[in-house]
Structures are given as structure tokens and as C-alpha cells.
Amino acid sequence: METEHNGTKNIGRLNTSSGLFSSTLKSSLTTTTPYKPTAIFITGEDDSNVQYPGGK
């Protein structure tokens, strides 16, 4: 998440699951933050505890 005054913040990871008889993946994210977001973006990282997104 990007904020106006507090920079980039890691707000969690997507929880992914698939249906028993389906190959479709579904993801969800539930989080609470005291910061007002200006943008939310998703990145693919090797570790869920990173504070800033990695390179390309």
C-alpha cells in the first residue's frame, strides 16, 4: 500500500485457494491499517515479510 505521508507499507499477503472440483484460483486479503491509502498494488515476492517491493 502506498500512503501520502507514510510511504510504502506492507499490509499482508494474499491467501489463495482453489475449489475442490475447479482449477480456478481465488484469493482474498483482509487487513486493518491506521494509514489512508493512495494506491494499493500487488507484487510477487519470495518472502511475505518484505517491507518494500523487490526489483523487476
Image (cartoon, rainbow, N blue to C red):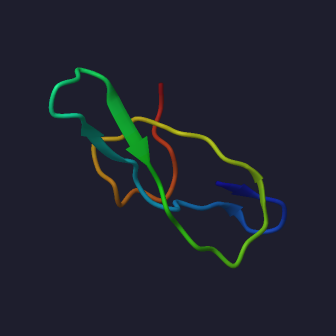
**In front of the other: 52 or 24:** 24
Classify the position of the N terminus by image quarter: bottom right
Residue 43: give x, y in percent of width and height.
Answer: 48, 37
* Number of residue marks: 0
Q: Is residue 29 left or right of residue 8?
A: left
Give the residue drawn at x 37%, y 36%: 26
Residue 8 position by quadrant: bottom right
Give the residue drawn at x 45%, y 39%: 54
Residue 4: give x, y in percent of width and height.
Answer: 84, 61
**In front of the other: 22 or 6:** 22
Residue 12: give x, y in percent of width and height.
Answer: 45, 60
Q: Is residue 27 left or right of residue 6?
A: left
Q: Which residue appears farthest toward the bottom when viewing the image? A: 34
Q: Is residue 18 left or right of residue 7?
A: left
Q: Residue 54, relative to residue 25: is it above or below?
A: below
Q: Which residue appears farthest toward the top when viewing the image? A: 23
Residue 3: give x, y in percent of width and height.
Answer: 76, 60
Give the residue drawn at x 16%, y 26%: 21
Q: Which residue appears farthest toward the left when viewing the image? A: 20
